Image (cartoon, helix red, strand yellow):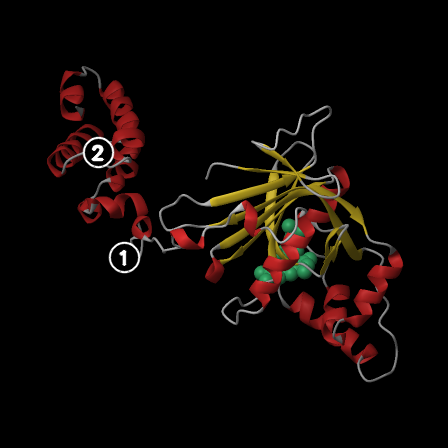
């Protein structure tokens, strides 16, 4: 018990430590009754009044935070911890027999088509792309998938951007889509290869001229002084290229990547949280496919079901 601990603790500093421990564990985990929280508040307030730690600790359990779910989920009157949306019901489960093919790209094509057919999915091709530095520090951002086929998934970007640099040092990448109205998500792990210059150039020129100019304007991921740096460059390039018949040259630092998938997971959410997860992967060397836990797929893939 916090109050007892604090009363027993002889020194000011060990009291602070007890409180710090308590705050980060039991208190934050919302296991304390209102009375205990009130005792803790008093204890910390008295003990730390004259220290700079006081305000930091006290703010963690001010009167305003007396609502327990507020402590966990915090701010703006939104009870984040209580947010919970129903997914699919039992009869809509995603079973192995529902796979349209025993290979991931065909299954992706089917689910992607379902997503594109729903107006409520605003940008079905928007996906999270996670990269990592060579030291293994991850970063993620949203990109638009611009194509897929048997070989993999394509996207276009600035090769000198943060992601571009990370992919040069470490070609491993992860993708993730979430089509919320369908309660479906797809996860991909793989490695990238650059698309050919020809393919990147062809796609670049298929974009609206303003987007082409945008790609030229932006030294993506670099720090700039203000927005005017962009707009003035943009205006100058528009004057040079728009309605002049001059082709906007694709910068050589801009182009496409193909993500060659090594693992592809299809997730479908169930309201009771017994979600379906079917994962395609390449077999390990000499792996025995028992068709019990691991099933033989097509085109060299195997698949298995993961616990949700
Ligand atoms: C919906 C959406 C689509 C985006 N599409 C792209 C894209 O196709 N290519 C791209 O380079 N950045 C795209 N971005 C911007 C990226 O999220 C990101 O800000 C940018 O690529 C710089 O990332 P980096 O600094 O990690 O390299 C998109 C952002 C959003 C929200």
Q: Quadrant of residue 32?
A: top left
Task: Check disc 2 and report the residue beneath it.
Answer: 31
Which residue is painted at 17% across and 32% down in the image? 40
Q: Is residue 79 left or right of residue 115?
A: left
Q: x, y percentage for residue 39?
A: 13, 32
**In the depicted view, which residue is nearer to us: 287 or 58?**
287
Which residue is painted at 23% across and 32% down in the image? 50
Which residue sits furthest left?
35
SS of the residue at dot 2? loop
Q: x, y percentage for residue 91?
A: 41, 54
Q: x, y percentage for residue 63?
A: 17, 46
Q: Is residue 165 left or right of residue 42?
A: right
Measured in 3D between alpha carbons, the distance from the residue under mark 2 to the one under mark 1, in whole angstroms, is 21 Å
Q: x, y percentage for residue 225?
A: 64, 59
Quadrant of the image containing the N terminus: top left
| Residue 86, placed above or below residue 55 | below
Q: Is residue 109 left or right of residue 205?
A: left
Q: Quadrant of residue 238?
A: bottom right
Q: Quadrant of residue 273?
A: top left
Which residue is painted at 22% across and 40% down in the image? 61
Task: Check disc 1 and report the residue beneath it.
Answer: 77
The quadrant of the rendered image in which ligand 1 is seen is bottom right
**In the depicted view, which residue is nearer to us: 27 or 199?**
199
Neighbourhood count class around disc 2 (C-alpha, 10 Å): few under 14, some 14–19, many 20 upward:
few
């Amino acid at each position: 018990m916090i109050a007892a601990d604090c009363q027993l603790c002889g020194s000011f500093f060990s009291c602070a430590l007890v409180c710090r421990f308590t705050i980060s564990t039991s208190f934050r985990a919302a296991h304390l009754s209102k009375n205990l929280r009130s005792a803790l508040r008093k204890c910390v307030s008295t003990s730390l009044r004259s220290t700079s730690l006081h305000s930091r600790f006290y703010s963690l359990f001010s009167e305003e935070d007396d609502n327990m779910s507020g402590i966990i989920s915090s701010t703006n009157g939104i009870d984040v911890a209580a947010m919970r949306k129903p997914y699919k019901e039992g009869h809509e489960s995603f079973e192995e027999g529902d796979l349209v093919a025993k290979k991931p790209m065909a299954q992706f094509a089917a689910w992607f088509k379902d997503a594109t057919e729903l107006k409520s999915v605003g940008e079905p091709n928007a996906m999270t792309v996670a990269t990592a530095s060579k030291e293994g520090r991850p970063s993620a951002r949203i990109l638009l998938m611009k194509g897929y086929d048997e070989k993999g998934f394509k996207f276009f970007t600035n090769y000198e951007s943060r992601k571009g640099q990370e992919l040069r040092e470490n070609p491993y990448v992860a993708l993730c889509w979430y089509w919320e109205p369908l309660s479906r998500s797809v996860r991909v792990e793989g490695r990238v290869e650059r698309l050919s210059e020809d393919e990147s150039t062809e796609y670049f020129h298929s974009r609206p001229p303003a987007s082409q100019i945008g790609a030229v304007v932006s030294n993506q991921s670099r720090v700039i002084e203000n927005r005017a740096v962009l707009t003035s460059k943009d205006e100058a390039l528009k004057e040079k290229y728009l309605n002049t018949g001059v082709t906007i040259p694709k910068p050589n630092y801009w182009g496409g990547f193909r993500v060659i998938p090594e693992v592809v997971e299809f997730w479908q959410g169930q309201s009771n949280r017994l979600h379906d997860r079917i994962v395609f992967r390449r077999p390990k060397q000499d792996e025995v496919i028992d068709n019990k836990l691991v099933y033989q797929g097509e085109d060299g893939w195997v698949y298995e079901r993961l616990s949700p």
